[in-house]
Image (cartoon, rainbow, N blue to C red):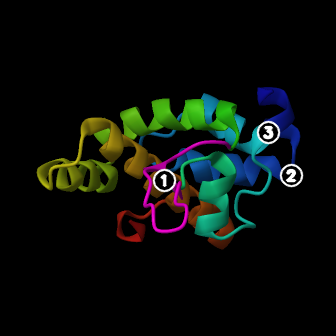
Amino acid sequence: MNNLIENSPVWKPKYELLQSVPGVGPIFSATLLSELPELGVLNRREIAALVGVAPFNRDSGKFRGTRSIWGGRASVRAVLYMSTLSAIQHNPAIKVFYKRLRDAGKKPKQAIIASMRKLLTILNSIVKTNKPWNVNYA
C-alpha cells in the first residue's frame, strides 16, 4: 500500500496533508485514502453519516427515542476511533474539545465519539482546501 501511495500523483499529496495533523498516523491515513475516497468531496454532515459517527434519532410520532450512531463504514470507524484516542493525547485542539465535553458532564464514550466526528470534519476540510494542518482550523 505504501508503494501505491508514494507512486500515485493523486494519493501522495492527500496522504501528506493527512499526516500533517497531530494524532494521525500512516495506517489511518492509508485507510482513509483507500476506503473513503469521498473524503474532501462531501460536506461535513454527509461525511460523518457515511462513516457512521452522525447521531440518528429513533423517534416515532410523539415518542422521542434515543440518539445513537450506527451504520456507515465500520473499518473506517474503527481506525478513526483509535486515531482519535491518539489525537486526544497529542492534538491540542482535539484535547481541549474532549476536555470541554467531559467538564460539561458528558460520558467518556460520548466525548470520544464527538471527538471522532470533529477529527473527521477537520480531515475532510484539510483535503478539501488542500492546506496542511493549522491549529486555527479547529
Residue 29 x %, y %: 64, 39
Residue 9 x %, y %: 86, 52
- State left or right for residue 137 relative to residue 47: left
As helix, strand or loop, the secondary structure at mark 2 comes to loop
Quick check: 29 above or below 57? Answer: above
As helix, strand or loop, the secondary structure at mark 3 comes to helix
Residue 97 x %, y %: 27, 56
Q: Amino acid at mark 1?
A: Arg
Q: Residue, x 71% and y 57% (percent of image)?
A: 39
Magenta residues span 56-71
Circle on res. 34: 3
Residue 26 is one of the magenta-drawn residues: no
Looking at marks 2 and 1 on the same chain, the residue that comes earlier in the sequence is marked by 2
Circle on res. 117: 1
Mark 2–mark 3 distance (CA, rounded to whole Å): 14 Å
Q: Amino acid at mark 3?
A: Ser
Query: What residue is shown with label 2?
Result: 9
